[in-house]
Image: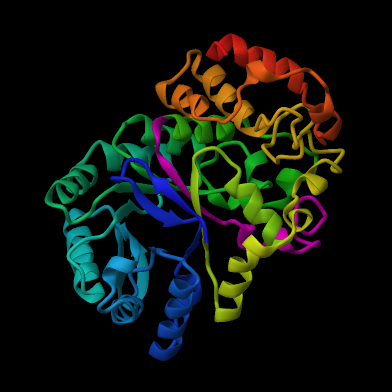
Amino acid sequence: MKYRVLKRCGGLKVSEIALGCEGLIGKTQDEFQAMVDRALELGINFFDMYTPNPEFRDSMGAALRGRRDKAVLQGHICPVWENGQYLRTRDLKKTKEAFEDQLKRLGTDYLDVGMIHYVDSESDFEKVFGGEIIEYCRMLRKQGKIHAIGLSSHNPAVARKAVETGLVDVLMFSVNAAYDMQPASEDCNDLWNLENYREGMGMDPERKALYELCERENVAIDVMKVFGGGDMLDEKLSPFGVAFTEYQCMEYCLTRPGVAAIMAGCHSIEEIEKLASYYEAAPEEKDYSTVLAGMEKFKFYGNCMYCGHCAPCSVGIHVADVNKYLNLALAQGEVPETAADHYRLLGHHASECVGCGKCENNCPFGVGIIDKMKKAVKVFGY
C-alpha cells in the first residue's frame, strides 16, 4: 500500500486506496468486522462514512474498538436519519444532533475529516458558506472534534468556490475519465446521461482548473465515483463504448493533480483484495491511455494526461510531473510557492532536456514535450 499526505491536516497520511461505506451497509456485524479487518491488514487506513445509518455507525464503532488510531475517519456533516431513511439537511439543530450521534456510535471523540455533505448548487453553496453550517464546522475544528473541514460535490464550479474560500481542507469529488469531459452542472444526474457524451468532447477546462487549484492550495481530493457507479467497467454503459478495467480507472484518478486517495465501495473481502492488488498489476494493466488515445470522437490530442508513457527519459526527467507543475503555474499566471517547491524537489529538471525526442515518440496524445520543457525552463528558471 502507498500513502499520500493530507497537507492541510497536520501531515496526516492516508492510503491511496480508501474504503467507502456503500458496500458495508446492511452487512452483519461479523461480515462488517471481517471486511474492516482485511482492509486494515492490507494497509487501507482511510474510511469514508457518508451514511447516517445508525446500524452502520454502530458496526463501524465496534469494528474499530481498541484501534481507533489505526483508522483515518471521514464522517459527513448534514446527513441525518429520519423515519428509517437518509435525509440531507441544512437545519443546524438536526445537524448537531446527528454529528454527536455519529461520535457516540463510533466510540470516538473526534473525526479526522468532517465532510460537509453534498453541495452541488450555487444556492446551496451560499446557504452553507454564508450561514450557520460553516460556522459550526469551524467551531468543531477549533474544539478538536474534527481535525479538518471537507466538502463533497459533483459540481466543479461549486467545488472551486468552496476551495477558494480557504476554509476547505479536503474535497470529495467525482472523478473519472468520462466525468472529466462534462461541464459544470447543478444536476449530478447529468454525469450519468449517455446522451451528453454522444457527440464527443475533450477535457472540461473547469474540472482541469479545479484539480490544479487543489494541488496548488494543498487541498486534498478524495475521489468518489472512481468507476462511474460501475458504468466505466461495462462496455454497454461506458460513454466510450469500451470497458475500462478497475486498474485503469484507479490509475487515471491517482494521476490527477490534487488527488490523495480514491474511495471504493467494496461489497466483499474479495473486492477489497482485488483493489489492493493494483500495486501488483503490470503497467499495461493500468494503462488507461491505450483506451483514451483510440477514441477518435473524444479530443484528448495535444493534452498531457499525466499517463507516464513518455518515460523513460534519456536523462531521467519525470516529464509528467514537470508538465503537471508547469500547468499549475500557467493556470495561475505566476509560479505558486507550492508548485515551485514541488518542482525544486524533482530529481531532474526541464533544463536537463537534450531534445532527443524519445518522449514525443512515446506519447500517445501527441504532446509537444520538448517545447513544454523549454517553457518550463522559462517559467521556473531551470
Magenta highlight range = 217-244
Tell whether position 48 is magenta: no
Q: Quadrant of the C terminus?
A: top right
**Image coords of residue 58 (percent x, y):** 29, 80
Instruction: Residue at the far left: name it.
Output: 143
Looking at the image, what colour scheme do you see? Answer: rainbow
Observer-nearest residue: 89 or 206?
A: 206
| Left/right of residue 60 with respect to residue 351 in the rendered view | left
Observer-nearest residue: 47 or 3?
A: 3
Residue 153 seen in the figure: yes
| Left/right of residue 225 with respect to residue 336 in the rendered view | right
In which quarter of the view is residue 105 placed?
bottom left
Total numbered badges shown on the rendered structure = 0
Q: Residue drawn 79% across and 18% down? A: 355
Q: Residue drawn 41% across and 21% down? A: 337
In which quarter of the view is residue 346 placed?
top right
Residue 176 seen in the figure: no
Q: Residue drawn 80% across and 33% down? A: 365
Q: Residue drawn 79% across and 50% down? A: 240
Asked if 296 appears above or below 119 in the picture, the reply is: above
**Image coords of residue 312 (percent x, y):** 75, 37
**Image coords of residue 91 (percent x, y):** 22, 55
**Image coords of residue 223 (percent x, y):** 51, 52
